[in-house]
Structures are given as C-alpha cells and as structure tokens.
Image (cartoon, helix red, strand yellow):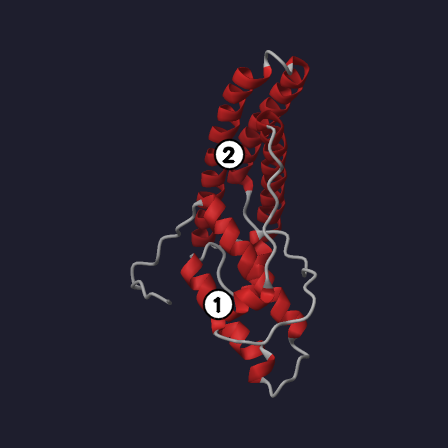
C-alpha cells in the first residue's frame, strides 16, 4: 500500500529521530568501553568495538534507504531492521556496563485496562498477539501512522470500552481482540517514548486533550 506524502514524512521523521538517538548512544558506548574495558577486559573490548562500529554502519545504511521507502511493506521492513540494530546496541552496551539487558515491558492487562477505561474486570491469561512493529500497532488501533500518543490513547479507550465484557452483557468472545488492542497500545506507548516522537497536528485541527 503506497504512502501518502504526509504519512511518509511522519514515518521519516520518526525514523530519523530514532537513528540519531541510537547513533549518539552507540558513540557514547564506544567512549565508555575505552574507559572501562581496556585494562581488564581488553579481549571483550575489541569485539564490542567491532560490533558498535557495525551498528553505526547499519544506521548509515538505514538512513540512506529512507529515501527509497514509498509503501507500507517497505516501511515495515526498514523499521524491523532498525529494531534489530537497536537490540544489537543494547546487547553491546549491556556488556560494556555489565548490566542486565533491557527487556520490553510486558503489559498487566487488568491494570492497564482499569487505568485507561475505568473497568474492573480482569482478563484471563495474556500471551501477546503478534504486534511486531509500530505499523502493526497503528493498524490494529485504526489510527494513522505517526499519530500522537494522545490520539493513540483515545482510540484505545474507545475500542476497549466497546469490546470489554461489561459492555456486552458478560460476553467474553471479544477477548482476543481486546488483548490485541491492549498490546498495540502498550507497544505504541513505549515506541513513542523511545522515539521521542511528537507528530505535528494539521493546522486546521486544534489540540484537544483527551485526559
């Protein structure tokens, strides 16, 4: 599916911010590695140095390929590559600083639903529903790629209220879809926070707080 120009620009803006942020982190990691690894972990230093240099090269390649992205599938492939590079940086940085690797936060469905919609019913076991990229998450919530966290939150609350058993006479048949939108919401909360994305609103649409 081809991108509109506005959607492409939002995608490009978000990717460039992530690339710039990760490039700065990788360069900082190299500096720290020199300070903390050269004396006692010199063998590990050379391996980590090589890995971080590969991270920086990959970022340059991804940045160049942004110009060629014109459709949804291309954007998803490029975003997946960037997520892989982000994970690689975290692996090396963790070794340098001798800290546990960061893990994606898992969602407590009962707590997040209660906070978002005021519901009180807990849902049964959550196992995830295959949200692997921001593109997936935006599509599940039915909002345009690049939408702000406020817009994402509003879409999530609206869908959650319609799907929750309390709104359907106790019918729990919509639980799989409810789990799916919850995962999409959680993914985008983290994604937007890490990417530092704050998409611009169209000039003809004033800001309206959702809280």
The residue depicted at 51 percent of the width and 39 percent of the height is 67
Closer to the camera in the image, 191 or 141: 191
Q: Quadrant of residue 147?
A: bottom left
Percent of width and height locating residue 110 = 58, 68
Question: Is residue 204 among the parts visible in the rendering?
Answer: yes
Regarding residue 1, the answer to whether it shows in the image is no
Q: Residues within 10 Å of mark 1 (few under 14, many from 20)?
A: few
Of helix, strand and loop, which one carries label 2?
Answer: helix
The residue where tag 2 is placed is: 22
Q: Which residue is painted at 35% across and 57% down in the image?
A: 201
Mark 1 in CB contact with mark 2 (< 8 angstroms): no
Q: Residue at horizontal 59%, vertical 85%?
A: 168
> Which residue appears farthest toward the bottom when viewing the image?
169
User: Going 41% across and 61% down the picture, which residue do you hit?
Assistant: 150
Is 147 positioned to the left or the right of 40 in the image? left
Give x and y (percent) for residue 16: 46, 39
Residue 144 x, y percent position in the rendering: 48, 60
Which quadrant holds residue 130? Answer: bottom right
Q: Which secondary structure lies at badge 1?
A: helix
Q: Is residue 175 above or below residue 65?
A: below
Label 1 and label 2: CA atoms lie apart by 31 Å
Q: Disc 1 designates what residue?
A: 115
Q: Position of residue 20 (x, y in %)?
A: 46, 34
Name the quadrant containing residue 87.
Answer: top right
């Amino acid at each position: 599916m081809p991108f509109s120009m506005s959607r492409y620009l939002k995608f490009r803006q978000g990717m460039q911010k992530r690339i710039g942020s990760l490039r700065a982190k990788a360069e900082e990691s190299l500096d720290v590695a020199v300070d903390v690894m050269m004396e006692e972990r010199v063998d590990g230093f050379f391996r980590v140095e090589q890995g971080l240099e590969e991270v920086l090269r990959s970022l340059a390649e991804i940045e160049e390929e942004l110009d060629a992205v014109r459709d949804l599938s291309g954007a998803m492939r490029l975003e997946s590559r960037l997520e892989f590079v982000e994970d690689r940086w975290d692996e090396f940085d963790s070794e340098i600083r001798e800290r546990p690797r960061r893990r994606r936060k898992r969602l407590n469905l009962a707590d997040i639903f209660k906070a978002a919609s005021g519901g009180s019913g807990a849902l049964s076991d959550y196992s995830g529903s295959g949200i692997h990229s921001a593109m997936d998450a935006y599509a599940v919530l039915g909002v345009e790629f690049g939408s702000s966290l406020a817009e994402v939150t509003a879409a999530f609350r609206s869908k959650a209220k319609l799907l929750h058993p309390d709104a359907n006479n106790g019918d729990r048949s919509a639980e799989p879809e409810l789990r799916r939108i919850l995962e999409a919401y959680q993914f985008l909360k983290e994604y937007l926070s890490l990417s530092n994305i704050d998409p611009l609103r169209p000039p003809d649409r004033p800001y309206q707080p959702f809280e």
